[in-house]
Image (cartoon, grey):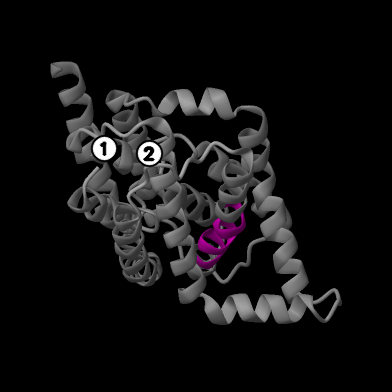
């Protein structure tokens, strides 16, 4: 992988992590188009670096929210911040369960099956189309909502299912306020990303030998900057009910991926 490939994949990860079009699906499509020939360990390390960049951009965009949550927790009281943190923990349970007990089965879907990615993008489009037609409410995410949203997040571990699209759409379809749904969706994934990165590091699966740190660096910077832009933009789009545009995009890309897969 050269520097320009890293920049392109960094941009793809940065935008698609927050925009409801599936970052994992687009990374799979991007690697297929660019002919990524990295050995598995190198490819995994690059993916981990990109995910860390987008997690960091989330923390920057929601720095006030994160600080309020941390400050509230340090009071060691049953306050709103503690309740919100509990909801985030509840939402993490389904994805954590799948990651711990079905990791090998999940990785089997990341073998360049472009037709599968295309089909899942169409599923994402349906979710976005339904959510875009929901009414505005002032309802907050409840504990039971958090668990259902967590199930959506676990399903979104499949390439082609947008994590932000699935979780925001599920939250909105449960009757939650769109802005609150977007905020919860972005904050709930940060602990999972950091946890997954820690697991990969301590498991010894990552290899830094023969690693081009220049390539990793430019990929990180591209993903971080694009993540900042996309996260801020996505909050406005959800609030203004513009998800149907992404539904159309997902259908077009999904159908194209399926057609190209069968032609090859």
Task: Give the quadrant of residue 69.
Answer: bottom right
- Residue 43 disc label: 2
Q: Say whether marks 1 and 2 touch (CB < 8 Å).
A: yes
Return the residue nearer the eye: 109 or 10.
10
Task: Residue at 56%, 49% (x, y): give it.
Answer: 197
Q: Is residue 87 left or right of residue 49?
A: right
Residue 68 sits above or below residue 104 on the image: below
In the rendered image, residue 59, in percent from the top left (x then y), is placed at 52, 71
How many circles with numbers are drawn on the protein?
A: 2
Q: CA distance from mark 1 to mark 2?
A: 10 Å
Give the farthest residue toward the left: 263
Return the residue nearer the eye: 4 or 182.
4
Return the residue nearer the eye: 44 or 254.
44
In the rendered image, residue 154, in percent from the top left (x then y), is placed at 57, 40
Say which element carries label 2: helix
Q: Is residue 46 left or right of residue 199?
A: left
Pointer 1 residue: 31
Task: Give the quadrant of residue 86.
Answer: bottom right
Residue 63 sits above or below residue 149 on the image: below
Q: Is residue 146 left or right of residue 171?
A: right
Magenta span contains residue 184: yes
Magenta stretch in the rendered image? 183-192
Task: Residue at 52%, 49% (x, y): give it.
Answer: 170
């Amino acid at each position: 992988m050269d520097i320009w490939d890293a920049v392109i994949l960094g941009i793809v990860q940065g935008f698609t992590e927050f925009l409801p079009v599936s970052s994992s699906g687009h990374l799979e499509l991007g690697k297929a188009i660019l002919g990524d020939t990295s050995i598995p360990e190198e490819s995994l390390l690059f993916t981990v670096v990109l995910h860390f960049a987008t997690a960091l951009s989330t923390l920057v965009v929601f720095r006030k929210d994160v600080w309020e949550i941390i400050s509230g927790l340090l009071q060691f009281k049953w306050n709103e911040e503690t309740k919100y943190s509990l909801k985030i923990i509840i939402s993490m349970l389904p994805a954590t369960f799948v990651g711990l007990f079905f990791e090998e089965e999940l990785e089997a879907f990341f073998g360049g099956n472009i037709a599968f990615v295309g089909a899942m993008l169409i599923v994402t489009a349906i979710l976005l189309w339904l959510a875009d037609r929901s009414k505005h409410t002032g309802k907050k995410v409840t504990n039971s909502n958090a668990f259902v949203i967590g199930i959506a997040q676990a399903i979104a571990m499949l390439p082609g299912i947008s994590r932000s699209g699935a979780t925001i759409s599920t939250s909105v379809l449960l009757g939650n306020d769109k802005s609150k749904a977007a905020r919860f969706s972005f904050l709930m994934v940060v602990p999972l990303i950091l946890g997954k990165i820690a697991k990969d590091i301590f498991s010894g699966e990552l290899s830094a030998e023969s690693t081009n740190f220049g390539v990793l660096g430019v990929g990180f910077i591209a993903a971080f900057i694009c993540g900042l832009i996309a996260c801020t933009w996505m909050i406005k789009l959800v609030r203004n009910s513009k998800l149907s545009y992404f539904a159309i995009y997902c259908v077009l890309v999904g159908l194209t991926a399926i057609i190209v897969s069968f032609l090859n």
